[in-house]
Amino acid sequence: MRLRLERRATPVATLLIVTDENGVLRALDFDNYEERMHTLLGRHYGAYELVEAAAPAKVTKALDAYFAGDLTALDALPTATGGTEFQRAVWKALRTIPPGQTESYGALAARLERPGASRAVGLANGSNPVGIVVPCHRVVGANGSLTGYAGGMERKSWLLDHERRHAMAAA
């Protein structure tokens, strides 16, 4: 599989944007987690080739709009991932959590009709290859506290604050 990589500066960090030949987003991660991104790409696709190239305008425009405050800009952005059926179900459910809001691992597991699977939801959440677009940063602990985030807790807090600020402004 041949994939394209663009490094793009954003207010929170430089992002690694990986797309396929059809312009579909395959991975999105922070630049200091490039090794993690390669690990996930290998798990999802096996052998792949990654070449430095510009991401499609529809992807970069959506990301730029999100960071400028348009919290719905990422909603229609197509993604494609590997992963198990359960992981893909978790990632699909993540996209239904409204910007600026959070949901616990347990609540997400219950919504997926797997009430005892909060740890499995956490593992799927941590294996999400398309951060921000598939908003794993919106999942919190049972008591509402910020818990693990592959991109770092500071970034999770920044993303949630960004979304809350713009969600309140839009209301």
Image (spheres, helix red, strand yellow):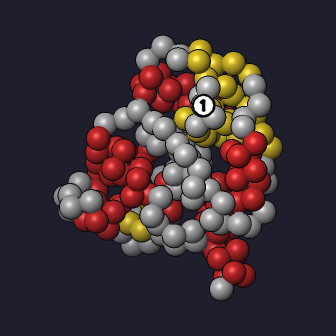
Q: Residue at x 29, y 41 (%)?
A: 85
Amino acid carrying label 1: it is: Asn
Residue lying furthest front? 22
Q: Nearer the viewer, residue 146 or 61?
A: 61
**On the rendered structure, is 126 left or right of 56?**
left
Residue 129 place in picture, x, y as percent: 51, 39
SS category of the residue bearing label 1: loop
Residue neighbourhood size for the residue with mark 1, other residues' Cα within 10 Å, grouped as few (<14), some (14–19), many (≥20):
few
Reply above or below: 68 against 119: below
Residue 116 in the image: state x and y as whole percent.
Answer: 19, 58
Check the image and report above or below for 126 versus 168: above
For residue 17, above or below residue 152: above
Q: Is residue 96 left or right of residue 74?
A: left
Name the residue at 23% across, 54% down: 117
Residue 63 at x, y = what percent? Answer: 71, 51
Which image quadrant: the C terminus? bottom right
